Amino acid sequence: MEHWLTKRANLSPETTAVELDNGDAFTFLQLKQKAERFALQLANVHQQGHLAILSDNVADMIIAFWACTYLKVPTVFLNTRLTVTEWQQQCDDADVQLVLCADSYSSDAEQLLQSVYSFSRIHDLTQADTTLASTIDMDAVCSMMFTSGTTGRAKAVMQTFQNHWSSAVASALNLGLLPSDKWLICLPLFHISGLSTLFKSVIYGMPVYLMERFEEDKVHQAIMEKQVTIISVVAVTCERLLHRLGEARYPASFRCMLLGGGPAPKPLLERAKQQHVPIVQSYGMTETCSQIITLHAADALRKIGSAGKPLFTSSLQVLKDGRATLSNEVGEIVVKGPMVTNGYYQREEANLKAFQDGWLYTGDLGYLDEEGFLFVVDRRSDLIISGGENIYPAEIEDVLLSCEGVLEAGVTGMEDEKWGQVPIAFVVRTSEQVTAEYLLAYCQDKLASFKVPKRLIFRSQLPRNATGKLQRYKLKDF
Amino acid sequence: MEHWLTKRANLSPETTAVELDNGDAFTFLQLKQKAERFALQLANVHQQGHLAILSDNVADMIIAFWACTYLKVPTVFLNTRLTVTEWQQQCDDADVQLVLCADSYSSDAEQLLQSVYSFSRIHDLTQADTTLASTIDMDAVCSMMFTSGTTGRAKAVMQTFQNHWSSAVASALNLGLLPSDKWLICLPLFHISGLSTLFKSVIYGMPVYLMERFEEDKVHQAIMEKQVTIISVVAVTCERLLHRLGEARYPASFRCMLLGGGPAPKPLLERAKQQHVPIVQSYGMTETCSQIITLHAADALRKIGSAGKPLFTSSLQVLKDGRATLSNEVGEIVVKGPMVTNGYYQREEANLKAFQDGWLYTGDLGYLDEEGFLFVVDRRSDLIISGGENIYPAEIEDVLLSCEGVLEAGVTGMEDEKWGQVPIAFVVRTSEQVTAEYLLAYCQDKLASFKVPKRLIFRSQLPRNATGKLQRYKLKDF
């Protein structure tokens, strides 16, 4: 296929590609020109082998990424929240030879053993005399991201151009594609929820509205005033936006708040419904290059709490002990489709475990209802087993979150001599009048006794990763 | 990939798949059930080898086609306007073993040497005990259609599932995909313009509004009252619809009149513009599984007369003597993309000529303007060469059609001792007051003298194929 950005610049040269929070914007033709120029500058110091990008959501990050595609260089995305030691380990694991970073990360990044160049330093170079790629090799690795896996050493997911293409197409077939679409990115580009929108932008010819980070006032204002039609969120950012919205209404042109990054608390979905916010629930992960299962808008209210059905090109099974589960029986979520990664980079053992006959065993738990809609129960690694009973932290969190005065809730397992494990809860509350006794009584009312937290601890915030996803495994040390 | 219709019936069981002119309608779930039932009945008499369908646009034709996909049987589409002798030749050429026909064609079809079954006879069979396909083999041949080529023996174009998939996806990326979309089919399903819409329907989850044939009053009424958003037309049906529309306006939700099937007369496009009809010009053929080049709505008025740019996944060259032409220089249109056929069935010589290095040499003539927009000049086989000058019939027809009182015009070449060939024109006029002298004087005013028709002949109609495309090579005998 012709290079996507070249093609798009040819088809829609004057269409806005990127709109920035600071008022700057550039068209697809300008984006192509900037990326080509950057590629020719970068070619002075790097032409082959893996390259890492360490940056917040700034225009240069988009330009640098597309520049890498013009050099056929796979990009490894580093999470800016990690420590230098963690970056070093990921760069080593992914065979990174050169690190490109936003200027603000220069001094930290220079501690790495790899060559490090800030965006500014590349901009200062002359343009090398090199031929840029005019086509896309669909089977080539385009990007690598380390999974925000909750246990074990992080693994680099290899994402091919075919994976990204298939993800963008499958999403359009489900959500539709309006000439007026504009997608707001406030999640990090180094996570798949952010990056996948860049491909959609170029493949659809659609502007993205890029924010450096999630700030609820700015995001709210953009939805209200900037003709944004779609935004990707996780539960915690969704929560804050609904709170900020209050009694107001989003414009009618705002058609989709795409919710991913883990099971959504049901109280949140109920509130969104009351506030007329068009939430579209989805399920996906780094390994599936964003959503692979999405609830169609037509079913949103009827199937509240469900992640939906597999996208047109993907398939889903829920398995238990090697057999398909019955309706409403919890098992492991197993998926297939052209957007699913071929595997983790140089992690043969993990690959053997995760991939069988073309299916990805996600390790996540869920069930299918009578009509085949998926309900995600929990991450398997977060499962609490107490006296032989399975306890899903999300269920307890949902109950806590439905209680007035609870802002955030996180549940994890604590070792227990008698039961093996018991649940404990961490809560962010709105006022000190909300007591532990009150909350535990509330839980006793709604949960089987073995699910009622054995301890309840108040905190001012909970541990979350860069997308805002709750990191339950960190709760105990928090 | 999972079988498309099964998948769609799973994702959108209650969505309307087909709406018929007589008020009948059925959902995707019902379509799947009907197709499965028909497949199991058909399996009694046919399980392998090529099968032909001979039918007008009726519900059974859609059901029978999808049934064939459940049996993994390639379908050969026969043009109902041909003679029994022509059907016989096509069935032989395409190795057809069994012919399925609408009941109205039974007596004609029974003259064929193949086994012939009417839809009714299949409906009367019991269901065989066979396993239906649950997946689609993307590289398999799905359908074959004989090209309406203007010269030479018709060739069967092999269309794979991958071709049809790629066509549907590329079209959506260009036209967009609205939840409210409903596509009206009034062109024959045995032509690619009709058939391609069936794939779009199932892949998008979009209703089609099916008409047995083009009748301007009925089509007009459907656009006005039935929430149709898109219709595919050729120039002559477009012309009649604009005439029928008169001073009225289509509903705002009607967003696209997709015009294909040959170069569009410029006066027609100008009139559409005046009547606020959202014409989208395109270029495609049986070999490209419908449009491969389309004018984006954003450029429709600025680039009137252009067929647009290649769709996102396709590529275009205009070549002359083996080199790329300059801007505005006429050459042969050469295209590439995943929607382009792998070749003609058992026509090795034609394949060697038409396909080189993955490019399809269309035989059509056109040029690219400075911005890379394609203007289709003519079918190469229709080119008139007069005293060494190239004359494109469409140019002369455009002039004639711009003259008040001319309903239809067709121009072809006549042998001439002095010039080799000279153009002659056939005209359908609105009144006998429009004389040949008047029209020729009109042409002299607007055309170089060698382009002015040497003869002008009035007719009550012009020869057209089943889609309404002018058959210039038949003019001389008309």
Image (spheres, coloured by chain):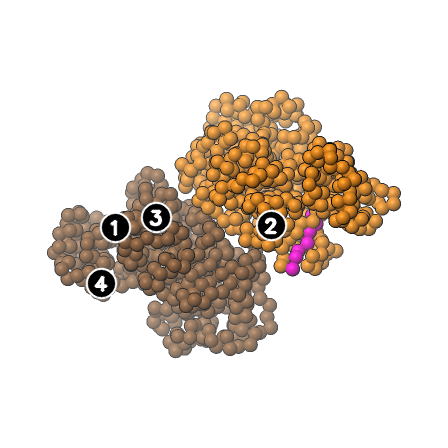
Chain colours: A orange, B brown
Task: Name the residue at the front extreme.
Answer: A433
The residue to which callout 1 is attached is B267
Give the chain of mark 2.
A
The residue to which callout 3 is attached is B307
**Magenta residues, dominant SS class:** strand
- Name the secondary structure under disc 3: loop
**Residue A476's quadrant in the figure?**
top right
Q: Amino acid at mark 1?
A: Pro
> Mark 4 or mark 1, which is nearer the start of the sequence?
1
Quick check: B182 above or below A203? below
**Residue at mark 1 shares a chain with residue at mark 4:** yes
Mark 2 neighbour class, 10 Å CA radius: few under 14, some 14 to 19, many 20 or more: many
Indicate left or right for B333 with A225 as reference.
Answer: left
Foreground: disc 3 or disc 2: 2
Comparing B167 with A171, the one in front is: A171
> Mark 1 or mark 3, which is nearer the start of the sequence?
1
Q: Amino acid at mark 2?
A: Ile
The residue to which callout 4 is attached is B476
**In x, y percent, where is residue B71?**
54, 66
Q: Which mark is residue A293?
A: 2
